[in-house]
């Protein structure tokens, strides 16, 4: 892994608005590009790998090691053409996810959340959206999964500052999907038995377009 200079803008530290929500829609291309350049893409763990099926450890150290992990996650996300990636998807047992994901208004959101907690929605904001969902850790499979079309996640940024992230539509789905990962759940765990079996069959029949970690 190449050693990088230490004076750089971190993708994981963003300004917040007066409600405490991160401003994650600005300078996306530059921030993502810089993180990818500093990072090293790693192979993706797939369903069956134990690291994906248990709750990850809380992040407690917000230093250079975490910054490098975040950069590697952005590089891995890019290599696999993902819109979100949790640390356990590159085999790291820590509660961190990165995202680079459009919402339903076409706005691109790019950022990092450590120790995410999905907030309960008020009843009037709970509207289910029937979208298609896929996961880099279940390569080549897709399934319909109803999820709320609005999500708020609280957590910390790469430096440990408290943050809130909110999303609509596809980005709301991403926030829920990535938070699930860090608690040991894949989206296929939310499907019916039959749909789950179908997703695993799609995976068995397909060939991932990126490097994966073989299961024993
Ligand atoms: Zn996933």
Image: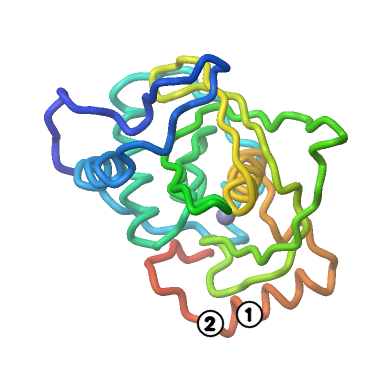
Q: Is residue 7 above or below residue 136?
A: above
Q: Nearer the viewer, residue 127 or 176?
A: 127
Look at 26% across and 49% down and name the residue there. Answer: 40
- Mark 1 burial class by Cα count in 10 Å: few <14, some 14-19, many 20+: some
Regarding mark 1 in the picture, which secondary structure is present there?
Answer: helix
- Pointers 2 and 1 in contact (CB under 8 A)? yes
Where is residue 50? Give x, y as percent.
60, 50
Query: For the view shown, which residue lies furthest in the right direction?
Result: 123
Where is residue 124? Give x, y as percent.
85, 36
Q: Is residue 202 left or right of residue 195?
A: left
Q: Is residue 125 left or right of residue 213?
A: right
Regarding mark 2 in the picture, which secondary structure is present there?
Answer: loop
Look at 54% across and 51% down and name the residue there. Answer: 105
- Mark 2 burial class by Cα count in 10 Å: few <14, some 14-19, many 20+: few
Task: Give the number of the disc on residue 193.
Answer: none
Task: Give the number of the disc on residue 202.
Answer: 1
Look at 57% across and 25% down and name the residue there. Answer: 164
Residue at mark 2: 206
Where is residue 158? Give x, y as percent.
40, 25
Alpha carbon separation for disc pair 2 and 1? 6 Å
Residue 57 image-quadrant placement:
top right
């Amino acid at each position: 892994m190449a050693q990088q200079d230490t004076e750089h803008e971190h993708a994981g530290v963003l300004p917040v608005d007066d409600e405490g929500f991160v401003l994650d829609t600005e300078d996306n291309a530059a921030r993502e590009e810089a993180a990818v350049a500093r990072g090293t893409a790693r192979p993706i763990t797939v369903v069956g790998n134990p690291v994906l099926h248990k709750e990850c450890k809380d992040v407690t150290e917000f230093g250079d090691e975490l910054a490098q992990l975040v950069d590697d996650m952005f590089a891995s996300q890019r290599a696999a053409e993902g819109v979100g990636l949790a640390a356990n998807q590159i085999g790291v047992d820590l509660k961190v996810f990165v995202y680079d994901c459009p919402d339903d208004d076409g706005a691109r959101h790019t950022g990092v959340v450590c120790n995410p907690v999905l907030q309960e929605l008020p009843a009037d904001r709970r509207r289910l959206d029937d979208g298609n969902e896929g996961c880099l850790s279940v390569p080549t499979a897709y399934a319909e999964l109803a999820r709320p079309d609005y999500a708020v996640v609280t957590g910390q940024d790469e430096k440990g500052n408290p943050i809130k992230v909110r999303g609509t539509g596809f980005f709301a789905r991403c926030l829920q999907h990535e938070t699930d990962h860090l608690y040991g759940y894949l989206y296929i765990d939310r499907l019916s038995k039959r749909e789950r079996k179908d997703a695993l069959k799609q995976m068995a029949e397909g060939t991932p377009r990126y490097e994966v970690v073989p299961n024993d």
